[in-house]
Amino acid sequence: MGKVCKACTVFKDLCEFSKGPTNKDGYVTTCKSCISKRNKEYWRTPLGRLSQIYTAQVQVSKARKHPQPAYSKNALVDWAYLNGYSQLHSAWAQSKYEKDLCPSVDRLDPTIGYSLTNIRIVTWKDNNDKAYSDRKHCVHITTQNRKVRQCSLDGKEIAVFGSIANAARSTGITRININDVCRGKSHCKTAGGYIWQYAD
Ligand SMILES: [Zn+2]
């Protein structure tokens, strides 16, 4: 027993199709290999990759016994586009989906859960290298008493703080995140929804 797959139009044995109770013959209309190919392509689209990241965060949080991500999938998508995701995604696509360049999201402070002030966008390789160096050296934060300026996204100055630590305390935005933006180390141009720069 078999049938023709709607997508590749090849006649295949029924065991090549998943069960689909709502279909007359009890099997879905597209064969398993066409569906897996379609899924693989979906995971490579900008939104598909973010969906995959979000699903992984939900699962990993559960496994670590951390609270669930403090944001919805849509909020993650909005945040990602504000923080340089499209550039990173196009670089990945241009590389023909090189694994090392796959966009990924990591936590700034790995001891706590996922929240919009505790994540940043990195490549898969950055994420893995960082996980390795965090384990090896503990997280190292540069503490410099340089003044920092907080600006709105349209570049208007909101406040100047005596140091990054000070800014982090006053705004509740993670110190490493502000630090990375000031030092130009991060793919993110913003932290906590603000532009940050050294004021001196
Ligand atoms: Zn097929």
Image: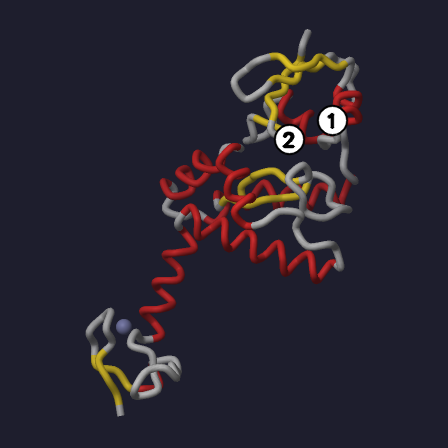
Q: Determine contact: label 1, label 2, CB under 8 Å.
A: yes
Residue density around tag 2, few if under 14, some if 14–19, many if 20 or more, within 10 Å: some
Q: Position of residue 94 (x, y in %)?
A: 36, 40
| Residue 147 horizontal side relative to residue 51, left or right | right
| Quadrant including the N terminus | bottom left
135 or 14: nearer the viewer? 14
The image quarter containing residue 61 is bottom right
Q: Earlier in the sequence, mark 1 or mark 2?
A: 1
**Where does ligand 1 appear, by image quarter?**
bottom left
| Residue 164 horizontal side relative to residue 93, left or right | right
Check residue 123 in the rendering and tell me which mark sits there, or answer none. Answer: none
Mark 2, residue position: 192
Question: Residue at (55%, 43%) from the top-left corner?
Answer: 75
Q: Position of residue 157 (x, y in %)?
A: 62, 12
Q: Amino acid at mark 1?
A: Thr
Mark 2: secondary structure: loop
* Location of residue 96 with respect to 25 vertically, above or below: above
Mark 1: secondary structure: helix
Q: Position of residue 130 (x, y in %)?
A: 66, 41
Residue density around tag 1, few if under 14, some if 14–19, many if 20 or more, within 10 Å: few
Question: Residue at (51%, 32%) from the top-left corner?
Answer: 82
Q: Residue furthest bottom?
A: 1
Mark 1, residue position: 171
Instruction: Give the distance between the C-alpha atoms of the residues marked 1 and 2, in whole angstroms.
Output: 9 Å
